Image: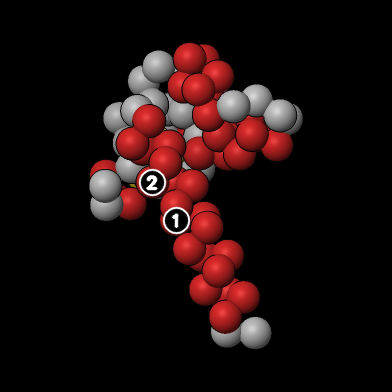
Amino acid sequence: MDLSHAIHSDPDTLGGTPVFVGTRVPVQSLFDYLEGGDTLDEFLRQFPAVSKEQAVTALDAARDSLLAGARSS
């Protein structure tokens, strides 16, 4: 899935906070759940409007960004 189909930011939606497309669920919520020790499946149960494909795309983008930064150091 293309990132633009997974995550969206609009000043009129939660003040521009990145959210999953088609929802008002902040992407930060995914990272908060994982940081708190919850699984991806638990996050998806709590936020059924977010598809697994959207969540995995967000995680892939975060991984790619981190690894790209590490390579340029």
Please provide percent x and percent y for residue 66. 58, 65
Q: Is residue 34 above or below residue 38?
A: below
Disc 1 marks a residue whose amino acid type is Ala
Q: Secondary structure at mark 2?
A: helix
Residue 57 numbered tag: 2
Disc 2 marks a residue whose amino acid type is Thr
Between 31 and 17, which is closer to the camera in this rendering?
31
Please provide percent x and percent y for residue 24. 42, 27
Please provide percent x and percent y for residue 15. 50, 40
Can residue 16 be seen from the camera position used here? no
Query: Residue at image x 55%, y 34%?
Result: 30
Query: Residue at image x 55%, y 19%?
Result: 42
Query: Residue at image x 57%, y 80%?
Result: 71
Task: Say few, some or many: other residues with alpha carbon within 10 Å of mark 1 (under 14 / 14 to 19 / 20 or more).
Answer: some
Q: Is residue 34 left or right of residue 8?
A: right
Residue at numbered disc 1: 61
Q: Is residue 4 left or right of residue 62?
A: left
Task: Say few, some or many: other residues with alpha carbon within 10 Å of mark 2 (under 14 / 14 to 19 / 20 or more).
Answer: some
Between 10 and 30, which is closer to the camera in this rendering?
30
